[in-house]
Amino acid sequence: MIQGAFLLPEFDHPSQPRAMNFKAPQHTAVSSLRTVCTLLLLAGISGAAGNFPTYSWRDAETQEWLLCQQCPPGTFVKHHCNLRSPTICQPCPSLHYTQYWNYLEKCRYCNVFCGEHEEEAQACNATHNRACRCQLGYYAHGDFCIEHSACPPGSGVVTLGTPNQNTQCQPCPKGTFSSNSSSTERCQPHRNCTTLDMFLNVPGTSFHDALCTRCASFSSSTPEPDDKECEQALIDFVAFQNISLKKLMRLQQVLESTGSWQREWPEPESRAAVQKKLLLRLTELSEIQESPALLPWLLSTFQKAKLTTLERNIRKRFSFDLND
């Protein structure tokens, strides 16, 4: 995307071209002064008087090889030197440039144009071609700008993406989590339920935060109506059980065949995706079921899905009579 250095023209010439000692006409003091001013100007640009880059050029009249001074960046050769005159340089026109000392007979055209997902990093000027870089949120890969990758759930950003580098991710270490796909978010620490004066309902994993509640247990086999705190705790406990992905999907299939559930989910990509779908489905079903019937109904659902361990965990967590 950034224009490279151009190659200067090359000529066949003898190894020892004639160095030019220009002689101004004796009868014209103005011409002499103009020549001196030109040399001083070039000396100021190069930083050292008389220390200019040179090139070999064959005089059109005498066919003799001469050693001419090059033109500084931002200019080109309007007239090559001859026995009577030094090199005459002229500034580059608009939208043209020369980046280095040169003996080009015309400036180069600014031929770099910013493409899709690119922005101008440097405008075209007399000494530089236009330069482009990837827009925010993209990085350069080959000749294209590609969107920064998002770290999947369970991993977080270590190094943010730059215009030249993709996002760097790592799995969330113990005690931290990331529940979203993001190109900017780092892993976050699990909340501490004790400091919030709450019970730990579901331990945190690398995919989700610790879930806290004030519901210690259901008081009986028929919970009080509108006990939303315990109802939510029950839903969270079921949705985020640390069981195999295969068992989670089996529970999802049983729940989706219940009632008027008609939605078709795409094939899940991860445990986090299945758990989020379970949470949504359980929340919808809880709005259909009466609160006192929610727990018994869920236990019967687990039996249908042959998830006896999950049923046992629910009874133990919420002090639900194992004989009920």
Image: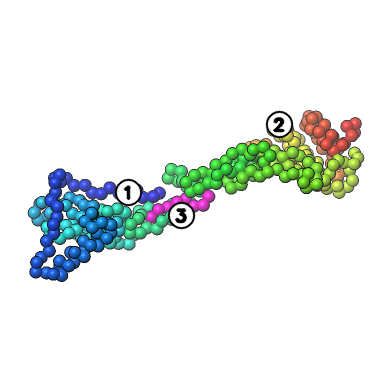
Does residue 164 belong to the magenta stretch? no
Q: Residue at x 84, y 34 (%)?
A: 316
Name which residue type carries label 2.
Answer: Ser
Left or right of 286 in this view: 87 = left
Badge 3 is on which residue? Answer: 119
Q: Quadrant of residue 294?
A: top right
Asked if residue 273 shows in the view, the reply is no
**Where residue 217 sits: x, y (%)?**
86, 40
Q: Which residues are magenta?
A: 130-137
| Residue sitting nearer the eye, 94 or 188 | 188
Name which residue type carries label 3.
Answer: Glu
Residue with the most extreme front position: 48
Left or right of 299 in this view: 137 = left
Asked if residue 87 shows in the view, the reply is yes
| Residue sitting nearer the eye, 154 or 323 | 154
For residue 5, the mark is 1
Tag 1's secondary structure?
loop
Does residue 134 belong to the magenta stretch? yes
Name which residue type carries label 1.
Answer: Ala
Q: Nearer the viewer, mark 2 or mark 1?
A: 1
| Distance from Cα at disc 2 to Cα at disc 3 | 47 Å
| Residue sitting nearer the eye, 71 or 121 | 71
Left or right of 234 in this view: 104 = left
Badge 2 is on which residue? Answer: 244
Tag 3's secondary structure?
strand
Tag 2's secondary structure?
loop
Left or right of 298 in this view: 264 = left
Q: Within 10 Å of the Cα at label 1, are there few (<14), some (14-19), or many (20+) other Cα atoms? A: few
